[in-house]
Image (cartoon, rainbow, N blue to C red):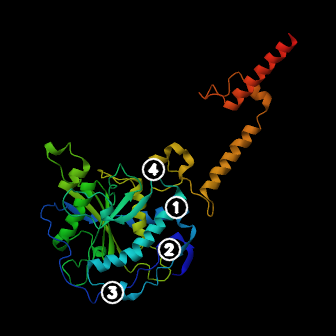
Amino acid sequence: MSQLNQRLLDYLRLPNPQLDCKRWQKGNVVGKLTDHNSPANTVKWKNFESDALKAISSGELKDALECRYEFHDHSDIPRFPFCEIHDKQSFESLLVKSNHTIVSDALAKAQTHLRVRPEMFMVRGGQAIPPQRRGRCPDWAGIHGHRNGNTRPNNILPGITIFNIEGSEHDIPWSEKEHLNLENWIDPVRQLLAYCTKANARYGYILTEKELVAVRVQPCPDHKPPEDCETKSAAARTGDAGLLEFFAIPWKNGMQENFDGLTINLTLWYLHMIAAKGSEIDDDYPSLEVFKKDDQSTAHESDAAQGPSSHQATPQGTNPDDIDEANTRDTMTILSEVSIEEREGSTKPMFKASGRKRPRNEQTKDQNQDKAQKRQKFVKG
């Protein structure tokens, strides 16, 4: 496989493989889900594209996306057999080989650059805790790189795959709709809404061979819950009467010359990055333009103890271990510049203040000096 040396942003804007769907097998895309509620309202996710483009062209995300790396070239995926789509499984096989691999590689490089901890991963749905003990599992999951005991991590970004070929019962152009017609999409939407609310995940997505549909859910503001439901969580109220916002990214994005918008891979990467900063369902959400250099309210609380520099971008080509070593050298240089007289003239013991014992070699040295003095007194006596 050939290598590419390019910006992370250009890597995520590479065109998707060209699909051959002539041999598809018609069948039920999603089973009937009569036990799940439909959203109370579905609207187009306003400002998603503009906010996302602002976020990736400024602040920390820009720093990460402008770095150059060596990548494997996935554009030479053989048309046969990988691009011949027969059913959902063959489509997901291509997604794993192409989109999933690219997004995972980009997430790893960006999070290393930004020192994001715990890391965020795009995985198959079975690698996360199922939203329900019994029932279906999402096709995709976004997880943090830590676990509690031996359990699987939580799915904070569920995704499902729909094989939406032209002429099927699910053929609705999302990107052309201001309000979603649920007549044909009722089952996929019910399914994703159920996954999001059970996992308390505000973001989700639907992948088709035509487009990626980014989704955000919250309690419907126009729906007043009954008095006995006012104490319910935002996730539970979303399950009862939720607002589903959607925005579609066409599969063909990136195939145009000098394309500078959102592609499916760039959007998937962006959804994982913003989910890593905050993923729980709430009644209201801040702007998506959340990655800024002066943003001190980061959700990566596990790095808070490392000081304000824990999320600063690492300069290109710099090893984080080298930075730590340099910091240690600087500290030792500062200590060496303190004169012995200043240290000896201090009224505070150097080790008592920190609660540490004196080093053993210094204790042994003092004991040897005491013994030598006693020997001299004994000889003189």
Is the residue marked by circle 4 packed among few (<14), some (14-19), or many (20+) residues within 10 Å?
Answer: some
Q: Position of residue 78 (x, y in %)?
A: 42, 87
Circle 1: residue type: Ser
Q: Earlier in the sequence, mark 2 or mark 4?
A: 2
Q: Which of the two marks, 3 or 1, is nearer to us in this view?
A: 3
Is the residue marked by circle 3 packed among few (<14), some (14-19), or many (20+) residues within 10 Å?
Answer: some
Q: Which type of secondary structure does the marked residue at label 4 adopt?
A: loop
Q: Is residue 24 visible?
A: yes
Residue that carries the numbered disc 1 in the rendered image? 58
* Gap between marks 1 and 2 measured at Cα: 18 Å
* Gap between marks 4 and 3 measured at Cα: 41 Å
Residue that carries the numbered disc 2 in the rendered image? 11
Circle 2: residue type: Tyr
Residue that carries the numbered disc 3 in the rendered image? 84
Circle 4: residue type: His
Residue that carries the numbered disc 4 in the rendered image? 300
In the image, 285 versus 203, the foreground residue is 203
Q: Position of residue 321 (x, y in %)?
A: 61, 54
Q: In the rendered image of this protein, does residue 26 appear above or below residue 370?
A: below
Q: In the rendered image of this protein, does residue 10 appear above or below residue 334?
A: below
